[in-house]
Image (spheres, rainbow, N blue to C red):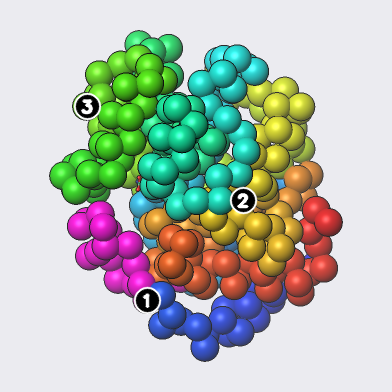
Amino acid sequence: MDYQKILEDIYEEIQPFAKDGKQADYIPALAKVNPDQFGMCLETVSGEVYAHMQADTRFSIQSITKVFALAMCLSMKGETLWKRVGKEPSGTAFNSLVQLEVEKGIPRNPFINAGAIVLADLLISELEDPEAEFLRFVRALCGSETVDYNMEVALSEREKGYLNAAIANMLKYHGTIENDIEQVLMFYFKMCSVEMSCRELAKAFLAFTNHAPFEYAGYKLSKSRIKRLNAVMQTCGFYDEAGEFSYLVGLPGKSGVGGGIIAVYPHRYSVAVWSPRLNSKGNSVLGMKALELLTTYTEESIF
Ligand code: GLN
């Protein structure tokens, strides 16, 4: 398969949509990003890397970080994790409060904000130095020691993070989080602020293709757990657009409001794409289109 040519063709094909959507501006630091950027990188399990355009530009991974947090929590807690957070698609926006109230403080899944705030709380409870430990894990996955938090983005989100603060308060009221609300929120915002490039994300997510034993920075996951983690990405990775992504692309994946999307083709490859302009659901317009074309042109998907 000539993936390099396919990535180049995809880029040409999506140009008519290049001005659709706009970048996230509810986090002031993200509003400053040039929206007209695009990068893509695919890495196969045999180590071939195909990159196009700004595949080496780092961007705010935002909700993609939730997959890393889930992997750590699953490694430490196993199935008992699911007492604190569900694994059903939410069908609601990533920052919705409605379900959380009705369902008495148990978030539908770990990939909506409420669910990931619970993961942040769990990591704080379990680890001596959760911030350093989280970075150590992500760095081991992507093989880059310079991947880091962006404090300007994290603090900017904290300043305007009214909805996430409301979510954390509701979780605390229902007893779903144990630690101090401010500490949990700040750690959640820091995890979201991590910056990585498409090349680094593709490398990191290769670990989730289940082609080799999973052990990074001391965190282990069995093949069965990786299968389950991919299942949660498939059903919950795109909030109220999870069905649409599954329908168009046919791979498990995860998006973030920084404009990044990763997708995993188990036992074959991982792919990362980034473009900051988002649709109304908070998913990258060009990113969705590029991945739809990738599985269409290659005629490869899990289905
Ligand atoms: N940090 C973002 C938030 O909490 C993450 C959301 C996302 O990427 N969908 O709103």
Q: Residue furthest left?
A: 159
Say whether disc 3 or disc 1 marks the residue closer to the N-terminus.
1
Q: Which residue carries the number 1 mark?
A: 36
Q: Nearer the viewer, residue 297 or 97?
A: 97
Where is mark 2, residue-wise?
253
Residue situated in front as seen by the camera: 176 or 265:
176
Please state which amino acid type lies under the numbered disc 1: Asp
Determine if the C-beta at disc 1 is less than 8 A from ligand 1. Answer: no
Residue wearing tag 3 = 182
| Image quadrant occupied by the C terminus | bottom right
Q: Which residues are magenta?
A: 22-39
Q: Which is closer to the viewer, label 2 or label 3?
A: 3
Q: Which numbered disc, 2 or 1, marks the residue closer to the eye?
A: 2
- Name the chief secondary structure element in magenta: loop
Q: Position of residue 45 (x, y in %)?
A: 73, 46
Residue at point 33%, 29% (across, down): 170
Above or below 13: residue 118 = above
Residue count near mark 3 (Cα–Cα under 10 Å), binned few <14, some 14–19, many ≥20: few
